[in-house]
Amino acid sequence: MRLRSKVIWRFVARNVPWILTVAALVVVVGTGRPSIVLANGHSQSDSKKDEAPPTTKIKIEVTDPNDKPVSQASVYVRFNESGGVFHKDKLAELDLKTNQDGSTKVPPIPQGKIMIQVVAKGWRTFGSWYDIESAEQTVQIKLQARPHWY
């Protein structure tokens, strides 16, 4: 009997790193992510619920230097979207066109840093980052004349 217990303890002692690795994988695979049990019995992942970030609706108005609307301009809106590989943010993009009034409405997107780029035939390409922190906002963009190349 004594020999058996020595053999078992030797096996456990040699394979502790492997056993701990398997235990960690069981925690990760079983719950989706590792969680730390706090003193009150609740895990850390329970206290941090996956809350959706606040969203914003943006109206973009594109005009020329004389304040006339620019229709059929391509508007590209880029923003960070959570849920990428390894829970990292990924850059998502919306492609829109302006209407006859030179405006377009962006569907609800997460608030934060947003890139707006405007491309229109006969006008210089515009692009800029905006820090949007409100539920609704109107962004006015004035396009500049394309440089003349001789």
Image (cartoon, rainbow, N blue to C red):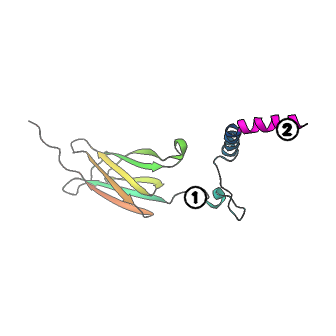
The residue located at (48%, 55%) in the rendering is: 108
The 10 Å Cα crowd at callout 2, few under 14, some 14 to 19, many 20 or more, is few
Give the image location of residue 55, x and y in percent: 48, 58
Give the image location of residue 119, x and y in percent: 29, 44
Per the image, label 1 sits on a secondary structure element best described as loop
Q: Nearer the viewer, residue 11 or 22?
A: 11
**Disc 2 residue type (three-letter):** Ser
Q: Nearer the viewer, residue 58 or 12?
A: 12
Per the image, label 2 sits on a secondary structure element best described as helix
Judging by the rendered image, the residue that carries numbered circle 2 is: 5
State how far apart marks 2 and 1 are (Cα): 50 Å
Give the image location of residue 85, x and y in percent: 53, 41
Specify the quadrant of the image occupied by residue 122: top left
Placement of 63 over or under 125, stated as above or below: below
The residue located at (30%, 58%) in the rendering is: 140
- Which disc number belongs to residue 51? 1
Please identify, in this view, whether the residue under mark 2 or under mark 1 is nearer the observer.
2
Q: Is residue 29 left or right of residue 54?
A: right
Q: Nearer the viewer, residue 31 or 60?
A: 31
**Disc 1 residue type (three-letter):** Glu
**Highlighted range, magenta:** 1-15
